[in-house]
């Protein structure tokens, strides 16, 4: 099947990310049928012009393309088990969640009998990238299937950074490795900044020096500064960050590669989750380092002892 000029797009999972991504598709003129367990999230999309699906079954039976943007493997598996037998022959299921190949392939035999294609296409770029339609998208699956849905990716993401990274499952793997490295950057940066400031260097001078050095990173340049403004990024919840770290370590175990650094970073994240709660922001492990040092990484008050 080739998609006709006005395909109906199903979108399941309208949270911090999916809410913006689906809104951008509606604003770009696509016809959307949406579903979420959260009625308010659905209403926000209906107010923008999307149609409400009363059930996953209704959505699956009606749509040419179904996009899922769910918390993780248990939700992805539950949704595909429910909708898989009902997806239209010739349709495409695109899972953009940060998940694992195992959760997505539970119905592969059935999907292929029904001529349903699928892609894994997780994203990076945070909620701000979802809002601006400039996500990075890492696609696993067949080239021909990617080309059929590329126009949708180019609405949700930066067309220059819709990357085909391999066959089915490769998108999930790339995304887990990106997150693992990003969380590792965060933990390492929090440690050196708190030590350096505690030792008497001005925070901004230290930050500028790191950026001018071989130790510079995109994390230090683009992401860390939100801490200076007291923003630990609650648009990505710690429960999801810890889910990603667990999946990344599972992957290392599955392929037989030791991951001592990842395991340590995960423990720091889980300590922060236990202390600050599952809905605290993904950058809250910086607060742990701040507490250990007895200071806050704030330009004006970095030298002050935290209460
Ligand atoms: P979220 O928790 O804000 O949203 C998930 C949505 O899925 C919620 O609205 C929830 O009600 C809905 N949902 C859960 N189970 C459902 C079901 N069975 N049927 C229908 N709806 C269901 O999560 P998010 O922050 O939008 O993240 C979504 C995915 O994107 C996750 O896999 C996450 O790891 C990944 N991700 C998040 C960010 C970020 O910055 N938030 C960035 C990149 C990737």
Image (tube, rainbow, N blue to C red):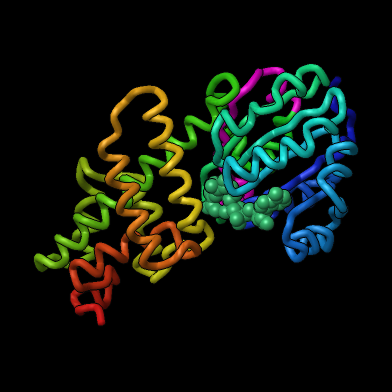
Q: In the figure, residue 93 lies in which quadrant?
A: top right
User: Does the magenta-highlighted stretch encompass residue 144?
Assistant: yes
Residue ID at (31%, 61%): 286
The N terminus appears in which quarter of the rendering? top right
Which corner quadrant holds the C terminus?
bottom left
Q: Is residue 196 left or right of residue 140?
A: left
Boundaries of the magenta span:
129-148
- Would you say residue 13 is visible in this rendering? no
Q: Please tell me which residue is depicted at 73% across the width and 47% down the height of the picture.
A: 12
Residue 55 vertical placement versus 153 (above, below): below
Q: Is residue 156 above or below residue 290?
A: above
Q: Is residue 35 visible?
A: yes
Above or below 183: residue 122: above
- Is 18 in front, or is 60? 60
Percent position (x, y) of residue 269?
35, 54
In terms of depth relative to the viewer, which is nearer, 117 or 145? 117
Residue at x 41%, y 26% (from the top left corner) = 254
127 or 214, which lies in front?
127
Residue 289 figure quarter = bottom left
């Amino acid at each position: 099947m080739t998609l006709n000029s006005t395909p109906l797009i199903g979108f399941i999972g309208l949270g911090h990310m999916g809410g913006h991504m689906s809104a951008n598709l509606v604003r770009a003129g696509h016809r959307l049928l949406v579903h979420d367990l959260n009625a308010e999230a659905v209403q926000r999309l209906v107010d923008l012009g999307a149609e409400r699906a009363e059930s996953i079954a209704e959505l699956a039976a009606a749509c040419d393309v179904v996009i899922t943007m769910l918390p993780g493997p248990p939700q992805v598996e539950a949704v595909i088990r429910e909708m898989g037998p009902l997806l239209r022959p010739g349709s495409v299921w695109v899972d953009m969640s940060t998940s694992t190949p195992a959760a997505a392939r539970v119905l592969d035999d059935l999907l292929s009998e029904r001529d349903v294609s699928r892609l894994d296409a997780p994203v990076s770029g945070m909620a701000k990238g979802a809002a601006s339609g400039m996500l990075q998208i890492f696609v696993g699956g067949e080239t021909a299937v990617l080309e059929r849905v590329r126009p949708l990716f180019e609405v949700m993401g930066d067309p220059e950074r819709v990357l085909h990274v391999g066959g089915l499952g490769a998108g999930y793997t790339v995304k887990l490795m990106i997150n693992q490295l990003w969380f590792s950057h965060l933990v390492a940066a929090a440690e050196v900044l708190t030590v350096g400031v505690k030792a008497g260097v001005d925070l901004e001078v230290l930050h500028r020096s790191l950026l001018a050095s071989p130790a510079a990173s995109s994390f230090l340049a683009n992401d860390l500064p939100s801490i200076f403004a007291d923003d630990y990024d609650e648009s990505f919840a710690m429960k999801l960050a810890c889910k990603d770290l667990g999946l990344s370590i599972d992957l290392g175990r599955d392929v037989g590669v030791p991951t001592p650094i990842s395991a340590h970073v995960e423990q720091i994240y889980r300590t922060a989750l236990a202390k600050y709660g599952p809905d605290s922001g993904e950058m809250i492990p910086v607060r742990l380092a701040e507490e250990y040092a007895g200071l806050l990484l704030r330009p004006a008050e970095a030298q002050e002892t935290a209460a």
